[in-house]
Structures are given as C-alpha cells and as structure tokens.
C-alpha cells in the first residue's frame, strides 16, 4: 500500500475572498479531514497566479476513493466547496492523483 498525493486546484467563486477560503478550509479540516484516518496530511497553498492548490496525501489510493465518496455526502464539505468556482470543473481532468515516492 503506497501513499497517494492529490493536487486539487482551487479557483475562488465570484464574490469570495481568500479570507472566506481560509475560514471554510479551517472548518473542513476540523470537522471532516481530521476524522479521516486515511488522510496523512493536507496543505493549502496560494499559487503565483492567484489561484490555490489543496495538496492532500492519503495512506493509499483506496483511502483516497473512500474520502472522495464521503465528501459527496458531507454538508461540511459542501460548505468548503461553496467558496470555489466549480463551473466547468472536471475532477478527472484537473485533479492530479500521484503515487508518492518519498515523504519527509
């Protein structure tokens, strides 16, 4: 079982600010991510172009799939996603799921 790192791009929804994103991210972390044993670490970064990237490392690809399924049913996740512009977002095309080689 090898860890998997996911790079999830984030663009803010119209009218939303970085402050909104950080508040929603904090609740997402506290009320959802922190309770998922399959999530090893998570980092939210601002890219030079003003968009964001959520970097999440999962214990395995199976854990990643399990968490994604739970996200679709979670009101906490819906609140986090509500600050994002998801119009035209295709997770299969835009999210990178990578096999982790080393983590330090």
Image (cartoon, helix red, strand yellow):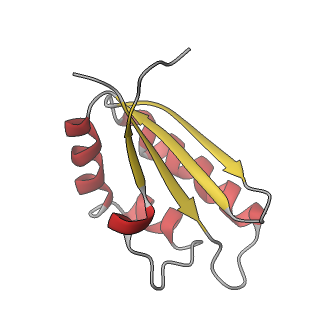
Q: Is residue 48 above or below residue 97?
A: below
- The residue drawn where x is 42% and y is 52% is 96
Residue 84 at x, y = what percent? 57, 72
Most foreground residue, 1 or 34: 1
Residue 17 at x, y = what percent? 76, 71
- The residue drawn where x is 69% and y is 55% is 22
- The residue drawn where x is 42% and y is 22% is 101
Q: Is residue 43 left or right of residue 36?
A: right
Q: How many marks?
A: 0
- Residue 23 falls in image quadrant: bottom right
Q: Quadrant of the C terminus?
A: top right
Q: Is residue 65 above or below residue 93?
A: above
Residue 72 at x, y = what percent? 29, 64
Q: Is residue 32 left or right of residue 8?
A: left
- The residue drawn where x is 58% and y is 64% is 10
Q: Is residue 3 left or right of residue 41?
A: left
Most foreground residue, 85 or 73: 85
Single out the residue that lies furthest toward the top: 104
Q: Quadrant of the N terminus?
A: top left
Most foreground residue, 27 or 10: 10
Residue 37 at x, y = what percent? 32, 28
């Amino acid at each position: 079982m090898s860890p998997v790192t996911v790079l999830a791009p984030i663009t803010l929804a119209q009218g939303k600010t970085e402050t909104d994103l950080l508040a929603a991210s904090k609740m997402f972390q506290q009320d959802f991510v922190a309770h998922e044993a399959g999530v090893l670490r998570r980092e939210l970064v601002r890219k030079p172009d003003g968009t964001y990237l959520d970097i999440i490392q999962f214990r395995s690809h199976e854990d990643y799939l399990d968490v994604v399924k739970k996200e679709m049913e979670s009101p906490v996740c819906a609140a986090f996603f509500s600050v994002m512009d998801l119009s035209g977002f295709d997770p299969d095309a835009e999210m990178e799921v990578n096999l982790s080689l080393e983590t330090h």
